[in-house]
Amino acid sequence: MSKERRKRGPVTVGAMLPGILADLGLHSAAHTAVLAERWEEIVGPAIAAHCQPVLIQNGVLEAKVDSSVWCQQLKLKRGEILDALREALGPDAPKDLRLRVG
């Protein structure tokens, strides 16, 4: 372990994971991990309780929703969710949203 790392103190696995995945060429997984970590903060607790990000691929966020009723409600809020993602993540935000019950 380098002296620099010891000076900074402990780092959580969640904080290290995106960098490790990106180093391995798994940028999509790293991007999804960052989003998952901030999901509730971005979409709010009500949506986060029923919907979780699964994968970001080719600029499309795929998310699973716990019921068809919530899936329908979130499809109606698709624009608001994408706006919140753009505001929080800037140019790294997904360009589209695909919801599925699962």
Image (spheres, rainbow, N blue to C red):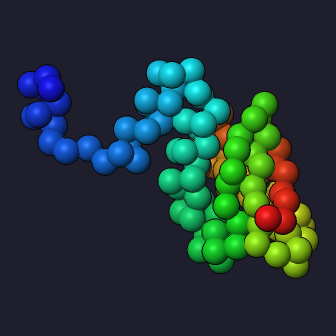
Asked which quadrant contains residue 15, the reply is top left
Q: Residue at the location (71% across, 40% down)?
A: 56
Task: Give the answer, above or below, for where 75 lies relative to 88.
Answer: below
**Residue in view at x 37 percent, y 38 percent:** 16
The residue under the point 70% across, 73% down is 50
Instruction: Give percent across and percent down for residue 92.
Output: 63, 35
| 86, 98: nearer the viewer | 98
Question: Horizontally, is 59 left or right of 29 in the view?
Answer: right
Quarter containing the C terminus: bottom right
Q: Residue at x 70, y 44 (%)?
A: 55
Apparent side of residue 61 relative to residue 29 in the rendered image (left or right): right
Give x and y (percent) for residue 78.
Answer: 83, 59
The quarter holding residue 71 reads bottom right
Residue 38 on image: x %, y %: 53, 55
Rendered view: 13 above or below 92: below
Q: Nearer the viewer, residue 92 or 16?
A: 16
Residue 77 in view (yes/no): no
Q: Position of residue 39 (x, y in %)?
A: 58, 58
